[in-house]
Image: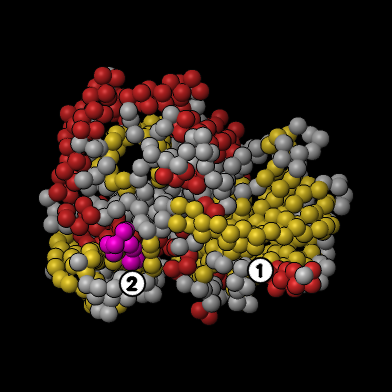
Amino acid sequence: MIASFSLMLCTAYGSLASNETQILSPDGKIQFKILLQEARLKFAVTLRNKPVIETSPLQMTVDGVDLAEGVEVGRTDRYPVNETYPWRGVHSQAVNQCNGAKISLKHAQNNTAYTLEVRAFNDGLAFRYVIPAGNASERVPDEATGFVLPAGSTVWYHDLNGHYEGMHEKKAIADVQAGEWAAPPLTFKLPGGAGYASITEAALVNFAGMAFQADGKRGFNVVLAHKQPVSYPYKLRYTKEDIERLSKPAAISGTITSPWRVVMIGSDLNTLVNCDIVHNLCPPPDPKLFPKGLNTDWVKPGRAVWKYLDGGQNTFEEMKEFCRLAGELGFEYNVIEGFWRRWSDDQLQELVNYGKERHVGIWLWRHSKELRDPEARRALFKKCHDLGVAGLKIDFFDHEAKEVIDHYQVLLKETAENQLMVNFHGANKPTGEPRTWPNELVREGVKGMEAGKLTARARHDATLPFTRFLAGHADYTPVHFGARRADTSWAHQVATAAVFTAPLLTYAAHPKNILDNPCAPMIKSIPAVWDETIVLPVSEIGEIAAFARRSGDTWFLAIVNGPTAKDIKIPLSFLGPGEYQAIFVRDRKDHSGAVQLENTAAKRKDTITIELRAGGGFIGRFSRK
């Protein structure tokens, strides 16, 4: 029996020389290797024996001491994880299956003992540093772990000027210059058709957020927030004193636990989009706050109207009208910007009651800086709870310093205590927060429809599902039929609502303009969450995103085309058995601001031909007969 168990460990984890430790994914296709080279810790990653991350340095410093240099390797404790749990967005059930290892390490000079924890999944890997509390009451960590990409890789990334609201640029890795900045997730295509990968972080708590800086030698190095260039939005909204304070590294008391450094890996884009690693690495919710977990009664995904980008007045009566129109659309929410603060509590209560009569909940905007004072914050949250407000849209974070990350956590906890949902704007990328805090329905951290000067929207929209959205949900506020759609068609716009993952799906278009549009029946039927998602093989980053998504027994086929016109054929093999009633919204050849509607029948054996304009799109709904 002991011999059989030893053989199983060798198969699952590998048997290597004393200066190497190997962790394999459960299916054995992904290999994570920790190496000790001249007393320096390094790592490497392969998929089917082909490099994903070439040999790269691990580097974690505490109070200026590099703990990965001059290190001794101790015992390795192995463990498996195998669970499923409810999820929302890309699919309704997450799978958390991996082989884990805790590698004991000691810095030879100062005897600091710490752990490098690693988990290998079938679709990627993750690692983090855990440094127990020492004699000092506070210590200052920093990190410069590197990720060296294989020669011939193609990478997509944006800089930090707009925080997480940027346009991804496509580059050959050889053309990436030293000093360039990149916001996670950093997505890249491996050479020779070996697959795709994307690097980000998970479980960002009690630590500064990370970005990357290129070294000009195919490497991207972790840089924590205090060393990152300050974004334009932060300079715009905060003081020089704030900037100076956040430019200093943050001290941490007690155990130092870094966020997980995550590499999502797959042979195709479908694997990346369906990857659960980021939220798998976060703890489950507190049952006292969320007695039914993700399905706790007061946490309800849904669609929302929003008066900001498509006309309307900033008045109490107009917001009542928006509630009425939301009810006519069958939408669940009305998101109201900061002008609500001019109203009395009696007016707010009247609006909440008016919305409830139409099954429409109210969300209210607030500046994050105004919620720094604990008493004022708690008073606002209690008032919103007592009035029956559904949630808060909290804006203008614009930084990933530990101080700001701590503020996110306080807001999530205290809104949960008051049964309020949250939408973070001016925000960083998600790192799995909704698993621990299901009341976070969505966050921005994306260059969305608010970017009125964005002219190359077609390529941007076809890039985002395979870059920013890999980190999690995003409040793009899709669908606009006016000039903001730039180089995209009406069909493209409607398709984004079904391709972009947002459990609070807030539409940019005025609700009356939605109701008056021929696409209204289709829009009314698009859900905010999905049971299943399949990224179809025709998809290519920046060129075309083709998703088949299921809600119950109904399937949607949504296609967002990039800047080049194309004709494609899509097999309907994703459908179940039997016949479906189908409705299609197609591009019009002669006008980007119009659509063709088609009603037909469909079966899984069928193949449909779709003609896509430059910047065009398609969406079809298949309802079982």
Q: Residue shown at 16%/54% (left/top)? A: 520
- Mark 1 or mark 2, which has the lower sequence index? 1
Image side of residue 38 versus residue 379, left or right = right
- Binning the other alpha carbons within 10 Å of mark 1 as few (below 14), some (14 to 19) or many (20 upward) gives many
Query: Depth check: 536 or 577 in front?
Result: 577
Q: Quick one: quadrant of the C terminus? A: bottom left
Q: In this figure, which colouring scheme has been used for the structure? A: secondary structure
> What residue would you read off at disc 1?
24
Residue 160 visible in this rendered orientation of the protein: no
Q: x%, y% of residue 534?
A: 38, 67
Q: Residue shown at 28%/76% (left/top)? A: 604
Report the span colored magenta: 547-555
Q: Secondary structure at mark 2?
A: loop
Majority secondary structure of magenta residues: strand
Q: x%, y% of residue 97?
A: 57, 61
Inspect the magenta stretch and tell me whether residue 549 lies in it: yes
